[in-house]
Image: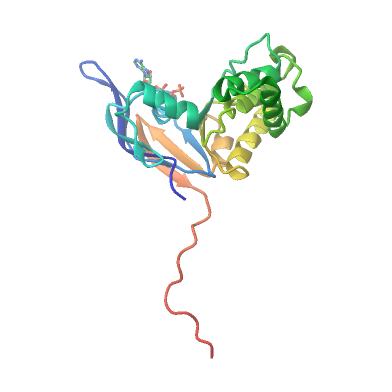
Amino acid sequence: MSAILETRNLGRNLPGDPPIVLVRDVNVTIEPGAFTTIVGPSGCGKSSLLYLLGLIDRPTTGELLVEGREVSQLSGDERARIRLARFGFVFQFHFLLPEFSALENVMLPIQRLGRLPIAQAREQALGLLAGVGLEDKHGKTPDRLSGGERQRVAIARALANDPILILGDEPTGNLDSHNSARVVETLHALAHEQGRAVACVTHDPGIAEASDVQIEMLDGRVENVIDRRPAKPQGLLGREPSAD
Ligand SMILES: Nc1ncnc2c1ncn2[C@@H]1O[C@H](COP(=O)(O)OP(=O)(O)OP(=O)(O)O)[C@@H](O)[C@H]1O
């Protein structure tokens, strides 16, 4: 399956003498249908890499291809257009608007992005909330939801533009184990049932071990990639079996 993101010797330095290296020589691919985690010790560059992958930050070296197209040299406006059209983000803090219900929080970006009439945006938002198991909680404001429910509303909101790629920076960082499990289940479903690419930074070894692809970082570099997906079927080798 073709990659949604591909990096070639991607790097990010901050100016200084010597420069501060956040990320160096990263070569990874992020593919649809897979739940990918980015792991490593604190300060090793996980979030910096995620921000590069999400076109939030711009690399200083190397290339980043989105669906085969090199994007690092594009203008800020063009990069923002790709981000808005193709990516969804979930952060450690949900950033829901406190005075709005779950439904309204999900409707807002749908209306803004699709310029849809209210009735249609409502329908779509209800569908997204049902997709994360919150159809019966749509009228509640964030303060009346659990941490995990708030985070699942944030995931539903991140799906407003029907993204091919969902990027998470510690999306379960603030949650207890029960709520964390529900959020992870939801993220797995986005990859495995809906065929999206999901890539998350996590400190949680259990989440990493259950991921399809685990990118392990150290000192700004990718040290190792564990790919747990079943091997792709190979073409038939040798001759067809004979009839006799
Ligand atoms: N704007 C900045 N100026 C200076 N140093 C920075 C800046 N941004 C990040 N760093 C440093 O770059 C390194 C990588 O940071 P980053 O946040 O990507 O690491 P991380 O692996 O996500 O860490 P954590 O797990 O603690 O969130 C850290 O040492 C951090 O202190």
Can you name the residue that lies furthest to the right here?
Answer: 136
**Residue at horizontal 34 percent and vertical 40 percent from the top:** 27
Q: Is residue 44 visible?
A: no
* Relative horizontal placement of residue 84, taking residue 17 as reference (left or right): right
Q: Quadrant of residue 46?
A: top left
Instruction: Decide which of 83, 186 is in the foreground and name it.
Output: 83
* Relative horizontal placement of residue 23, taking residue 243 as reference (left or right): left
Identify whether 236 is placed above or below 86: below
Q: In which quarter of the image is residue 128?
A: top right
Identify whether 94 is placed above or below 184: above
* Relative horizontal placement of residue 171, taking residue 73 as reference (left or right): right
* Relative horizontal placement of residue 192, taking residue 30 as reference (left or right): right
Instruction: Decide which of 144, 135 is in the foreground and name it.
Output: 135
**Residue at horizontal 41 percent and vertical 31 percent from the top:** 53
Q: Quadrant of residue 62?
A: top left
Q: From the top left corner, tell me how far across and down residue 218 is, in percent.
A: 38, 32
Q: From the top left corner, tell me how far across and down residue 157 is, in percent.
A: 61, 24
**Residue at horizontal 41 percent and vertical 40 percent from the top:** 67
Q: From the top left corner, tell me how far across and down residue 112 is, in percent.
A: 57, 19
Instruction: Decide which of 220, 132 is in the foreground and name it.
Output: 132
Quadrant of picture, ligand 1: top left
Q: Is residue 136 visible?
A: yes
